[in-house]
Each structure stands twice: as structure tokens, then as C-alpha cells.
Image (cartoon, rainbow, N blue to C red):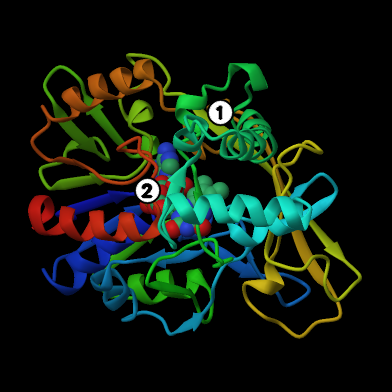
Amino acid sequence: MFDYVIIGAGLSGSVIAERIANVLNQKVLIIEKRNHIGGNCYDYKDENNIIIHKYGPHLFHTDYKEVVDYLSNFTDWEIYHHRVLAFIDGKKVPIPFNLNTLYEVFPKTLAEKLERKLLGKYQYNSKVPILDLLKEEDQDLKFLANYIYEKVFKNYTAKQWGLKPEEIDPQVTARVPIYISRDNRYFTDKYQAVPKEGYTKIFERMLNHPNIKIMLNMDFKEVLSIDLESKKIYFMGQEFKGKLIFTGPIDELFEYKFGDLPYRSLDLKFERLNMEYFQEVATVNYPNDYDFTRITEFKHIHPTKSEKTTILKEYPKAYQPDRDIPYYPVFTRESQELYNRYKEDAEKFENLILVGRLAEYKYYDMDDIVERALEAFEKEVK
Ligand code: FAD
């Protein structure tokens, strides 16, 4: 028998398994329902020899040095600064919206006037929420705020979350800032890079340890159950007295007893094209046109010599538990309350630890989840 069982071989489960195996020198079993490790960070080389992120583009960016140091035990890095363009009024322009974007979308004299006003009011390199600009007395700055809100955010958000544009609450969307800078990079974190040989290699190295056993193609429900009354966990029919680290969907663990937690899903459509490059940068957003939200060309992320290229179009869609992958939690007051009810129940189990975006119903970037998993190991698992 194992002292530790982990559900899910994504980033959270794999970091904790690695720590249990190496630091505690204990045996750990991972149960994963997919046919591969790595969760949503999984990547592979396709027939064009290009590294593809199977579950959508994953860009590593962080200010946490300790996360970089930890992951560097399992990979070398390639410096990479992500750039995103948005297709607006027939032109591709840099986003986040910055001072360069002004000159791409407006005539020079208007762009100069707006730049002067922005720099007269705000510090260079600061980020100003559109909502603040919308409140400006100055009519030119108000005009700019409305332009960005209408052309960049409103329809993109509507597509992403399946809402009508008029249902979008500016109080939420317009928190996104305009960047008072000439920096065209998408992120401004101190560390920005991609793993040299892709993400999957990180997982292979983390999990390649005699103390770690992995069962792929196995839904946890086939071997594990919880008794909601006695608050006991059963593994292969016997009471499990070790620690269960659960990184799957919390509502599934509790048999949806309070109802389904809402998520948004995606249809990911890959296309292999007979051309060297399809677009100028890794990602182009389409806020107002077409049904997809963005197109990613992976060759820009992992440079590869090839006559061909591979692109990905993302089509957001409603989520159905037995059909789709739960990509993004839909945060509303009701969904948060529903999650809290599950969490309260989970806390009554002595040997159950919840970690990860599905178990904690939280949007975590990769660096956040590594930080969270390392913390959970120190404070809850050890
Ligand atoms: P997961 O990776 O989801 O792992 C959970 C695992 O549990 C999965 O392997 C799943 O198959 C398994 N599981 C679920 N149910 C069961 C079951 N019943 N039985 C057994 N196993 C089960 N972060 C960034 O930092 N930069 C980015 O650019 C970025 N882009 C993203 C793009 C998209 C489209 C998405 C969805 C996320 C992105 N992220 C990005 C976030 C990143 O994917 C997460 O931080 C990370 O994957 C979280 O790891 P996790 O272990 O919590 O979850």
C-alpha cells in the first residue's frame, strides 16, 4: 500500500509527487485519467516537427525566483518574450494597448495628441485601468477609453464567456489596463522563457523516480471513493489511512452533491499548413471578427526549421461535464458559494488535501501553481 495517493498528473500533482519521492523518500501513487502526464501543460512534437501545446498555448512568465530555481532542476530554458497582436478594423496592432498601438490605429496628429495627454497625466511605464480612463473629464481620453473598450475588450469577452456584448459589465472588463509604454511585450514579468525541450520533458524528469508509480487511463472513481457520512476515504475497497492529494474537480469527488461547478470549455482546432509562416507573431487575437478568439502559431514559441507550420484556432464553448475539458472556472457569487460548500465538506476529512485549479476552483498560472504545490507540500503534506 502507498502512504500517499495523488489524483491528477498535472503540474500540481507532479510537483507534490516529486517532493514526496525525493524529500520524504516515501512511495507515492499517481492516478491520471488521461493517457499522458502533464495535465494541461502537455506538449508533443507534431508531424511538422514543431512542439505543440495540446491544450492551448502555455507561456511561462513569473516574478518568483524560487519557482524558476525549482523548475530549473528539470529543464534548461530558452528566453522567449510573448508578443500578441489584435486584429482591429482590418489591421493587426500590438496589445496590451500601449503608446505604439495609438500610432497604429489613429492618424498621426490624433495619436500625438493622445500620447501627450496620457503622458501629461500618467507616469511612463504605468498601467492605467480603462475604467479609470472612462471616468476622465478630458473628452479625448474618454474617447480613447471608449475606443479600447469597444474594439479590444467587449466582444472578445463576450466570445470568451458566451455572453451578449450588452451583458458585459464594464466594471469587470474595464479593469484591464492600457500600458503607458512603448514595450510591446505581452507580459512584463522578470522571468519569461519556455522550457528548451518543451513542458512534457519537465514532467518526465520530475516523475522518473523509483518511489513514484503512475496509473494512466484510470479515472479515480474506478479505485477510490469517499464516504460522505463517516468522512473516510476508500482505496481499492479498503479504508485508506494515508494522505490523498486531490487535484481533480472537487464537485466530481463529492458526486456533485451540491450541483455542478460552472466552467467554460474550448474547441481547439489545429491546422497544418504548407507555408513557412502563417502570421507575424505567436498569437493574434480576433476580438470582433470570426468565431474563434485567437490564432496561435507554435513555431514562434519554439523556433523550428520547417517548410511547414502549425496553427491553432480556439473556439470557446459551453462546458458539459461528460463531454468537455473544464478549462476556465466561471466566477460568479453563486459559483464561489457553491465551491465553498464543497470546500467546507472537504475540510472535514482528516487526510484529504486539495491542490490545483480544479480542486481549488481557481485560475492559477503555471508559476502560481508551482508556488502553491510547494507550499502545500511544506504545510499540508509533510
Ligand atoms: P491540470 O493541468 O488540469 O491537472 C489536473 C489533472 O487531473 C489533469 O491531468 C486531469 O486529466 C486529471 N484529472 C481530472 N479528473 C480526473 C479524474 N476523474 N481521474 C483522474 N485524473 C483526473 N498558465 C501560464 O502560466 N501561462 C499560460 O500561458 C497559460 N495558458 C493557459 C491556456 C489555457 C487554455 C489554459 C486552460 C490554462 C493555461 N495556463 C497557463 C494555466 C495552466 O494550464 C495551469 O496553471 C496548470 O495546468 C494547472 O495545473 P493543475 O495540476 O492544477 O491542473
The answer to which of 56 and 286 lies nearer the viewer is 286
Amino acid of disc 2: Tyr
SS category of the residue bearing label 1: loop
Quarter of the view holding residue 239? top left
Q: Say which quadrant the C terminus sits in.
A: bottom left
Residue 248's mark? none
Ranked by sequence position, the earlier of labels 2 and 1 is 1
Q: Are marks 2 and 1 in contact (CB under 8 Å)?
A: no
- Give the percent coordinates (x, y) of residue 129: 45, 41
Q: Is residue 275 left or right of residue 362?
A: right
Q: Is mark 2 within 8 Å of ligand 1?
A: yes
Q: Residue at x 18, y 23 (%)?
A: 345
Query: What residue is disc 1 on?
Result: 322
Residue 364's mark? 2
Count neighbours of disc 1 (C-alpha within 10 A) and say few if under 14, some if 14 to 19, many if 20 or more.
few
Q: Is residue 219 visible?
A: no
CA distance separating discs 2 and 1 = 23 Å
Q: Residue at x 33, y 31 (%)?
A: 250
Q: Is residue 1 left or right of residue 294?
A: left
Amino acid of disc 1: Asp
